[in-house]
Amino acid sequence: MGKRLKQQRRGKGSNVYRKPANHFKADVMFPKHPQSKVIGEVVEFIDDPGHTAPLMKILYDNHRETVLIAPEGIKLGDKIEEGMGASITLGSILKLKDIPDGLPIYNIESFPGDGGKLTRAAGTFSTVVAHTGNTVTVAMPSKKNIDLSPECRAEIGAVAGGGAKAKPIMKAGKNFYIKHAVNRTWPTNRGVKSNPVDHPFGGKQHHKGASSMISRNAPPGAKVGHIAARRVGRRKR
């Protein structure tokens, strides 16, 4: 009898594939939008294994604390602003309608009030391209342009920690612990290297042996490959 497929074991939610929440230090989200302008001070930097970028703890003048993603170039004691009438300074939180064209931004809300979902990886930034009618066009790190609501909020600057991935890993063991910190299983073996009882593509033939397209209604033990593919074959030019 073969083993369960990896996606089946992950879906079961066992301890091997589950990362307890207490292993991470902070949940990074924008606070509720204030009615008036508030000013905060950077009081601490946090190295969280759940984020590629360093985090910063902000203490506002109304004695409220929050944790945000740190931008490149910010330091302890710097001030950030949030709310109506906030000035454009490094790390400040503004609505897209108040951010001029060409300015780098990060930690962008995809919908107003969702807390920030886009452009959060270390070293990345997006750019405000244009304000047109009821939308704001933003150029993403992938070079793709997306249209967002002018009420969406974002931070000013680029995400810190851009050189983190420039250093070579050199050893497989180090990469294992890097993945382990964020609950990523590594290394991942190919299905064709498995035995037939362990994976539908297995059998020591170095190739799948059959089409990798599978029905959306296939049983769990066979649901690997290109699930419910829209098309097959080479794309005609």
Image (tube, rainbow, N blue to C red):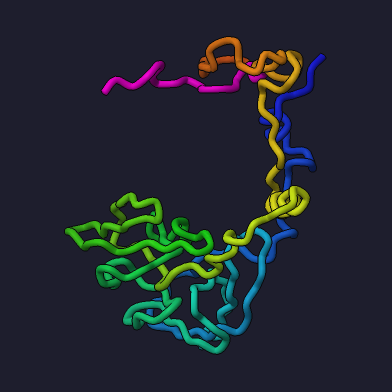
Relative side of 133 to 221, left or right: left
In the image, the segment drawn in magenta is 220-237
Residue 195 part of the magenta segment: no
Relative image position of residue 129 (x, y in whole percent): 25, 61
The residue closer to the viewer here, 68 or 173, is 173
Relative side of 97 to 82, left or right: left
Magenta: main secondary structure equals loop
Residue 227 part of the magenta segment: yes
| Residue with the most extreme left position | 133
Relative image position of residue 196 (x, y in whole percent): 73, 13
Relative image position of residue 73 (x, y in whole percent): 49, 79
Relative side of 194 to 123, left or right: right
Name the quadrant containing residue 187: top right
Q: From the viewer's perspective, is residue 98 above or below residue 137?
A: below
Q: Is residue 157 visible?
A: yes
Name the quadrant containing residue 63: bottom right
Q: Residue at x 37, y 19 (%)?
A: 234
Q: From the viewer's perspective, is residue 25 above or below residue 37?
A: above
Q: Residue at x 34, y 78 (%)?
A: 84
